[in-house]
Image: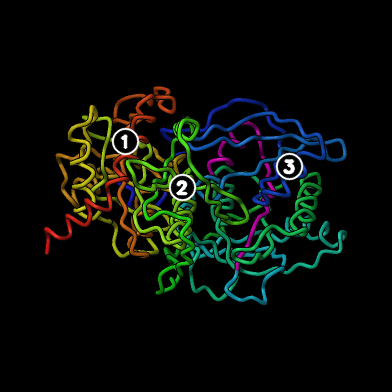
Amino acid sequence: MYIPLGENDNNPVAVLNARETVDLPEVAVVTHFGKAFEEFIKNNNCEKIDTLHLETTQTNIYVTEVDGRKITLVNPLIGAPMTVNTIEHLVKNGVKSIIACGDLYSNNESDVGKVIIPNSVIRGDGISSQYVRPSRNIFTDKSKRDILEKRLKQNNINFKEDEILSTDIRRNKFKGIYSYEASGILATSIFRDIESIYFGIVREKNGRPKKEEKDLLEVAIKTAGDMALKEEFYNKDNLSNDSEKYKVEIEDNKVEINKDNSMPNTVVMCFFEEAIDKYKGKIECRKVPINIRGIDFNVYVANINGKEIGFVQALIGSSGSAILMEELASHGTKNILACGGAGVLENEENSLYVPVIGLKNDGVSTNLSFGDFIRSDKEVVNIIKKYFENKPFSCKPCATWTTDASRRETRDTIDSRVLDINKRVCPETMPILVEMEYAALLSTAKKNNVNFGQVLYGGDKLFKGKEYNQNNWTKDNIREVLFESVLDLASNFELELEKSKNVGR
């Protein structure tokens, strides 16, 4: 079966499925109000019942009690891909109903502070199309919105029902209110046949968390206790099959650079948490704090081979990683190298790979650049290949499929993507990989005049005819070697790039 880009495979079983680890309460609160969440967990003696381990970090899952009824609590990572990944884990472990709350945004300052309950969500994201068939909107059911509205009124919180946009692009020209996670949450709920309610508050784009988020989280937790588990929430017939694709209008201008001389010109985005932790413990470095959606991150800056080089914990998923790259670019960073992991789909020959071309199946690159494919700059690829020629691990050029939905990589979908790459760009000699960030990062870099290259470690094998075997790849020693090698490469990257450009003149 061939599955075109933008279409979803309705087979509920993928190659990479969520795992059963613990029995969770059937109702869950999924929130992106990070500070309010931390405060609630601390002050209410919540029990940590499970931990979802991801490549860059871990997400703790808690249980609290509301009116004698146990409720699951979780604060997912930024962006729809990781939020959906978390929901998949919740559903696999017994959750049947969720109430989700988080940040909303608007390009109109007058909207800041408004509490919105969406009656409809425009699908401008990447992940929802991989869960439910194409349509312009996902509609919510008023009978379930009424449950939330009752609690908001009891707490004297003003709100409004409205249509919102769900997008992976931060710097857009949308005239209304938008979210980064709404479509992904609702589409996953439909696909997995669970109940869900979603609402949020419009925050200033770079604003810090406000007291209102604490109040709204408490409303969400109370509403979770009210939710009826057996009633059907969404009318699935409301999903039209008009195949209309909503495309977000993007800002034409580049990010505004606020150079404060604290951020170096070259930064390494690393997806290997344990490698960063080990490295920063053995080298002297300073911290440059940045803030993304109210969450504080540190960029570490060290002297490597006489050059100041930054490194930072990367965010999994197209939307989160692209936002991080934009933040770095806004501080004046001109060169970004990334190192991370990927699944190998065809032609397993090497441990390390440099992407040359990417098949775009994510929400960032499809909005930022034209066409189904995106290509790396030749000069950057050649610099990476040349560096690794004298290393124990050679670095082979590859094609890669960037997807937002790691739990929707079915065997038919994988076969279709391999066919897309082989037939349309003909890299028969190239290995083919799958990951979640490359196309998004490259398109964001091109949009903002950032030089970008990536090195991928082929950690898990997803070959046709073989059972999936993770091989404990998150603890492979090659990850530390790769990270430190890319830091070494970064220390001379700017010079090598200048040489390449001079040769081409």
Does label 2 or label 3 sit earlier along the sequence?
3
Q: Amino acid at mark 1?
A: Ser
Picture coordinates of residue 49, whole percent (x, y)? 69, 28
Residue occupied by mark 2: 317
| Mark 2: few/some/many CA within 10 Å (<14, 14-19, 20+) | many
Tag nearer the camera, 1 or 3 = 1
Picture coordinates of residue 134, whole percent (x, y)? 45, 58
Q: Quadrant of residue 328?
A: bottom left
One can see residue 258 in this view:
yes
Does label 2 or label 1 sit earlier along the sequence?
2
Left or right of 345: which side holds 364?
right
Q: Amino acid at mark 2?
A: Gly
Tag nearer the camera, 2 or 3 = 2
Label 2, label 3: how far apart the Cα atoms are: 31 Å
Does label 1 or label 3 sit earlier along the sequence?
3
Q: Amino acid at mark 3?
A: Leu
Instruction: Give the SS element for disc 3.
Output: loop
Residue occupied by mark 1: 485
Q: Which image quarter holds the C terminus?
A: bottom left
Please give the name of the residue rendered at 57% of the width and 26% of the height, measured from the top-left corner. Answer: 20
Left or right of 232: which side holds 399?
left
Of 118 and 241, nearer the camera is 118
One can see residue 240 in this view:
no
Q: Quadrant of residue 440?
A: bottom left
